[in-house]
Amino acid sequence: PDGAASWEFLDFSYSMGIGGSWNDEGHLDVRPARFPELMLQCLDRETLRDTILRIETFPEEQVIRTVTRIPETHLPGDEAQTIATGLLQRRAIVREALGAFLI
C-alpha cells in the first residue's frame, strides 16, 4: 500500500565459512542477531515461522547440488564440502537460533 515500509536485512559478510570460520564445526555457532527494538516491533512473525519451516524442509539433495555446481575456480572442493555440510547441519538448529523472535 502507499506509504507502507518494510525492513530488509541481509548480512553476508563472512557468511558460509569463507575464510575458514566454518572449519572444525564453526558452522554450529549460530546465534540470533541483535536487532534494534523498532525492527523487532516490525517483525512479521508468521513470515519468520514460514521461513524457518522452509529452511528445515529444504531438500538435502538440492543444498548439495546448489553448492557443488559452483566451479572449483570460485569455490575449492574442500570449501564446498564444508559449506554443504554446514548448511545441512545448520538447518537442524535454525529454529533454536531464531525461535526467540517468534514469542
Image (spheres, rainbow, N blue to C red):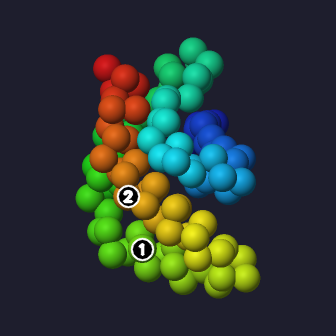
x and y percentages locating residue 79 in the rendered image: 60, 66
Callouts 1 and 2 close, C-beta under 8 Å: yes
Q: In the picture shown, does residue 69 fall above or below 48?
A: below
Name the quadrant containing residue 76: bottom right
Q: Is residue 79 left or right of residue 61?
A: right
Write the residue at 29% across / 52% down. 56
Instruction: Point out which mark residue 88 bears.
Output: 2
State the residue position of label 1.
Answer: 64
Q: In the picture shown, does residue 47 fall above or below 54?
A: above
Furthest-top residue in this view: 37
Amino acid found under the numbered disc labelled 2? Leu
Tally the numbered discs: 2
Q: In the picture shown, does residue 94 fall above or below 75?
A: above
Q: Is residue 68 left or right of residue 79?
A: left
| Quadrant where the image shows the C terminus | top left
Between 17 and 31, the residue placed more toward the observer is: 17
Write the residue at 40% across / 32% down. 97
Write the residue at 63% across / 47% down. 21
Query: Neighbour class for label 2 at 10 Å: few (<14), some, many (≥20)?
Result: some
Name the quadrant containing residue 96: top left
Name the quadrant containing residue 34: top right
Between 78 and 73, the residue placed more toward the observer is: 78
Q: Earlier in the sequence, mark 1 or mark 2?
A: 1
| Quadrant where the image shows the N terminus | top right
